Amino acid sequence: MASGSQAARSLYDRIGEFLVDQRLDPDPANYAFAYQLLANPDGPLARAVHALTDGGVRLTRRDIETLGCDVHPVAGTPTATIEKAQGLVAQTQMQVEGFQDMVTAMRAETKDFGRDLAASAQAMRSSGGDDIEVARITATMLERVRNAEERLETANREASELRTKLEEARDNARRDPLTGLPNRRAFEEAYAVQASTGARICVAVCDVDHFKSVNDRFGHVVGDRVLKALGEALSDTCKGHLVARYGGEEFVVLFTGLDLRVARAVLDRARIAVSAKRYRLRETDAPLGEITFSAGLSPAAPGEVFGTVFHRADQLCYAAKNGGRNCIRVD
């Protein structure tokens, strides 16, 4: 009885340590998630959590929702819909991994059973025994085991293919479907990884100037083309640094390993390259007019959370717009 109590107390302590380490509130949903995770440390959920937190990244409430724990996002919003889809993908992936574990165990068992049957049949034939019927039955069973092994091999291969497709789906969930760039979630995760290493970081927030007028004059199809073109220009100019579409006409750049002066020079080259292009309507070849963007750039202090740095850069971006647009404001 004492041993059981000690095990329960140990699990309780580990749950508390996990919540503190991940900076999660000790609410029922987070506690239930931690219990499911730590009570089965080798299970599919544990593997999924390990993949998410590899490199020192901490879990968020959104991650817990994605992994299938019963915390309820606000319904009826695009974000909630996306997270629900991501949650289904994550749950399905964990089920596939569990199925693969089961298939692997079954294959090992049938392999041993088949080997034992084969050895028994060979021994009976070698001994010259008269029990031909037993040998025949054993041979039949052996054939059935071999057929079962083949079917399990096929099932395991199909599960592996499905797992690959699910991993691709999870990667797609971190990409903006219009531009193909990483999305907000991927950017925030990348910031957390870099911040955990102590790397020098600068965050830029870029916003297309007069984008509403582009949509109003030419329609959303042309507006989408402008966003794609801007995403490509930023990616080409800021090679080696993460460019993401944060939402709407807003893009973000994660400069790693650069001081503020160099990061600004790179971003300014991107600004000049975008404003120098002369865009035309695909259908009529009529000039679209000058496309520019305004930006705010801020360095991150050691250990500073993403939200604080982003807010600072976002405010600088608004200052750039209010200051005449097509310019960069630096913290």
Image: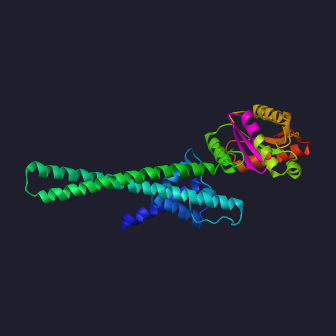
Q: Furthest residue to the front?
A: 284
* Quadrant containing the C terminus in the rendered view: top right
Assess whether residue 251 is covered by the magenta stretch: yes
Task: State the image coordinates of residue 266 (x, y, percent, origin top left).
Answer: 77, 32
Task: State the image coordinates of residue 288 (x, y, percent, origin top left).
Answer: 87, 42
> Where 91 falls versus 262 (above or below)?
below
Q: How is the image coloured?
A: rainbow
Q: Nearer the viewer, residue 75 or 70?
A: 75
Q: Nearer the viewer, residue 308 or 150?
A: 150
Q: Is residue 325 visible?
A: yes
Task: State the image coordinates of residue 278 (x, y, percent, origin top left).
Answer: 86, 36
> Where 62 falls versus 172 (above or below)?
below
Q: Which residues are magenta?
A: 230-255
Quarter-of-image position of residue 144: bottom left
Query: Seen in the image, is 127 located left or right of residue 58?
Result: left
Assess whether residue 80 is covered by the magenta stretch: no
Q: Nearer the viewer, residue 196 or 165?
A: 165
Task: State the image coordinates of residue 116 (x, y, percent, origin top left).
Answer: 22, 52
Query: Seen in the image, is 127 located left or right of residue 1?
Result: left
* Quadrant containing the N terminus in the rendered view: bottom left
How many numbered circles are shown?
0
Residue at 43%, 49% in the rendered image: 157
Query: Seen in the image, is 180 located left or right of residue 46?
Result: right
Q: Is residue 24 visible?
A: no
Residue at 71%, 60% in the rendered image: 78
Query: Seen in the image, is 194 located left or right of residue 148?
Result: right
Q: Nearer the viewer, residue 314 or 259?
A: 314
Q: Furthest residue to the right?
A: 324
